[in-house]
Amino acid sequence: MGRPIGISFTNGQGASGVLCGTSGGKLLVMEYLYPALFALKQYNFNTIQDINGFPHCQQQQRLY
């Protein structure tokens, strides 16, 4: 809970956001829409193929 996740759906699409929980067979995810606007989305478990947590960032590299 409260961690960023990536979701792949059975139709080939994907989404990412922060996992907020589950309710009534649905995954609850907070997604960013555009500046200063977030939305709590609900996805039915039967439409989800895979859920993965985001990996940790690699060591910061200098950009020139």
Image (tube, rainbow, N blue to C red):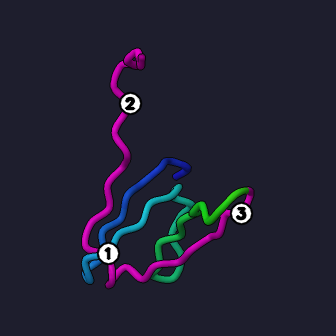
Q: Please name the residue that numbered disc 1 is placed on.
A: 13
**Viewer-side residue, 64 vs 22:** 64
Q: Please name the residue that numbered disc 3 is placed on.
A: 37
Residue 8 picture quarter: bottom left
Residue 18 percent coordinates (x, y): 53, 55
Residue 58 percent coordinates (x, y): 33, 25
Q: Tell me if residue 10 is in the magenta stretch.
A: no
The kind of residue on which mark 3 rests is Leu
- The part of the chain drawn in magenta is 36-64
Residue 61 percent coordinates (x, y): 37, 18
Alpha carbon of mark 1 to alpha carbon of mark 3: how far? 22 Å
Determine whether the residue tagged by mark 1 lies in a helix, strand or loop. loop
Q: Please name the residue that numbered disc 2 is placed on.
A: 57
Q: Within 10 angstroms of label 2, few (less than 14), some, or many (20 or more) residues?
A: few
Tell me the quadrant of the picture where the C terminus can be found. Answer: top left
The kind of residue on which mark 1 rests is Gln
The kind of residue on which mark 2 rests is Cys
Determine whether the residue tagged by mark 3 lies in a helix, strand or loop. strand
In the image, what residue occupies the spot 67% across and 63% down? 38
- N-terminal of the pair, mark 2 or mark 1, is 1
10, above or below 3, in the image: below
